[in-house]
Image: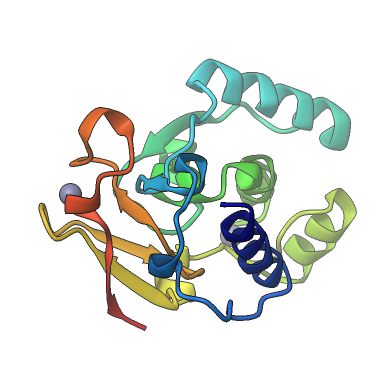
Amino acid sequence: MKKTIRKIFRAFNYDLFGQTPTIEPSHVELPSSFLKIETPPKADLPSIEELYIMFDKINAFYFANKLPQAKIEYSSRMTNAGSYTPALKLIKISKKYHQIFPDDIEDTLKHEMIHIIHFYHNAEFKKEALRIGTSLKAKPHPALRRKPKYLYLCPGCKKEYPRQKRLRMASCGDCSDKGRFDNRFKLKLYKS
Ligand SMILES: [Zn+2]
Ligand SMILES: [Zn+2]
């Protein structure tokens, strides 16, 4: 057993340096904590009220409260990080994008707030973006921007798990019994 544990740690350490472990996980006995349940990426997003508070703070801090009030909504369809519609005075924040990159939300809001005064990504827009430290361009959804290196598939429900990193002992979060690793639904590499 000691030897097995050493093997696991060796495999684990190798992984830290981005190298392929020399042993196959199926050859060793793994502690249950090593087994993982994979769930599709999701994150709790701020409420609309919290977004309005964020808007007020950014307006006060960077714009001396000079920006006119805009409406803020979440969009569940939009794949770009955010958008601004002048006719409606409406900022839309993409759910899909920020469930993957929750830390980007303030950046997106800042970017869209500049659009209240500068519609195009022109020189004036860029000057403001540099001044308040935000992205120059709207960020597209990562699925469109960066292809996942690996695509895993649940043998049960056929749900796709796009991942940038290799998975070893991982099973489907929807099918696995009681949220524990379930060998029947071990994710299979479909494409890499
Ligand atoms: Zn923009
Ligand atoms: Zn499944």
When asked about the image quadrant of residue 159, the answer is: bottom left
The residue that appears at 49% across and 29% down in the rendered structure is 44
Is 8 in front, or is 33?
8
When asked about the image quadrant of residue 179, the answer is: top left
Query: How is the protein colored in the picture?
Result: rainbow
- From the viewer's perspective, tell me whether residue 55 is left or right of residue 83: right
Q: Is residue 84 visible?
A: no
What is the quadrant of the C terminus in the image? bottom left
Q: Residue furthest top?
A: 49
Residue 2 coordinates in the image, percent (x, y): 63, 53
Residue 1 coordinates in the image, percent (x, y): 56, 52
Residue 143 coordinates in the image, percent (x, y): 40, 68
Is 107 in front, or is 144?
144
65 is higher (above) or lower (below) than 104: above
Residue 12 coordinates in the image, percent (x, y): 64, 62
When asked about the image quadrant of residue 113, the answer is: top right
98 is higher (above) or lower (below) than 7: above
Q: Ligand 1 lies in which image quarter?
A: bottom right
Is 185 in front, or is 60?
185
- From the viewer's perspective, tell me whether residue 85 is left or right of residue 68: left
- From the viewer's perspective, tell me whether residue 125 is left or right of residue 24: right
